[in-house]
Image: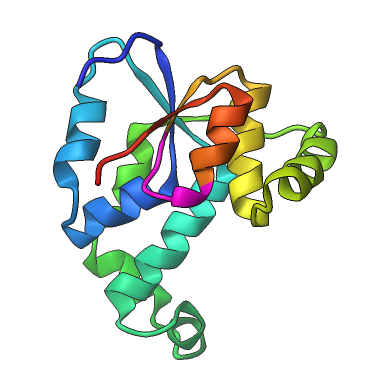
Amino acid sequence: MMFTTNNLFIDTSVLIENVKGNKKGFLLSLLQGKTLSCFINETVVSEFMFHFLKLNGNASPQSSQSSGKIPLIIKLSDDYHLIRLFHFLPSDGSLTTLVPSLMATYNLLPNDAIILATCKIHGITKLASHDGDFTIPCQKEGIELLTQN
């Protein structure tokens, strides 16, 4: 895959599918893009770590927490290091206005609205995701949605 813009936001779905062993080629092609800078935010970190606990703990993250197994899960699997491959984008106070607006306009859940708002705030015009909820919002907001079926 060849991309023309340098900034790309990586949605949690791309990371999770990679850890599950699905669609690994898609993430690899994004990471091999010599001119790409790939970004995530705290929402992606939170969602990814939540799914990481679920996938590697063979239980709900809450069950892993109550049984004291989170340290063991972290120790036994290093898949969580995947998030270290990306540049981190901080959020700012403009999310408090933009997120509710995006939620209302596109019927988005909060985390998806935060991701879309982060792209808009930081001028990122490409979003890699396997989440179909981004299709119309990305079209309307001028953000190219990159996905692999």
Q: Classify the position of the N terminus by image quarter.
A: top left
Query: Residue 55: horizontal and vertical position, in percent?
Result: 31, 72
Q: Is residue 4 above or below residue 127?
A: above
Q: What is the basis of the colouring in this image? A: rainbow
Q: Is residue 14 left or right of residue 135?
A: left
Residue 90 visible to an observer of this rendering: no
Does residue 116 appear left or right of residue 57 in this picture? right
Q: Is residue 112 above or below residue 41?
A: below
Question: Is residue 133 visible to the viewer in this orientation of the structure?
Answer: yes
Give the magenta part as a residue range: 128-133
Classify residue 83 as left or right of residue 96: left
Seen at 51% across and 20% down, the residue is: 125
**Displayed quadrant of residue 2:** top left
Q: Position of residue 18 (x, y in %)?
A: 23, 51
Pinpoint residue 91: horizontal percent, then vertical percent: 68, 34
The number of discs equals 0
- Location of residue 117 with respect to 1 vertically, above or below: below
Image vertical order of residue 4 relative to residue 77, above or below:
above
Any magenta on residue 79?
no
**Which residue does the image show at 30% across and 15% down from the upper left?**
3
Q: 26 or 60, which lies in front?
A: 26
Residue at horizontal 51%, vertical 82%?
62
- Quadrant of residue 82 within the rendered picture: top left
Magenta-span inclusion, residue 131: yes
Which residue is at 36% across, 64% downward?
52
Location of residue 9 in the rendering, given as x and y in whole percent from the top left corner: 46, 31
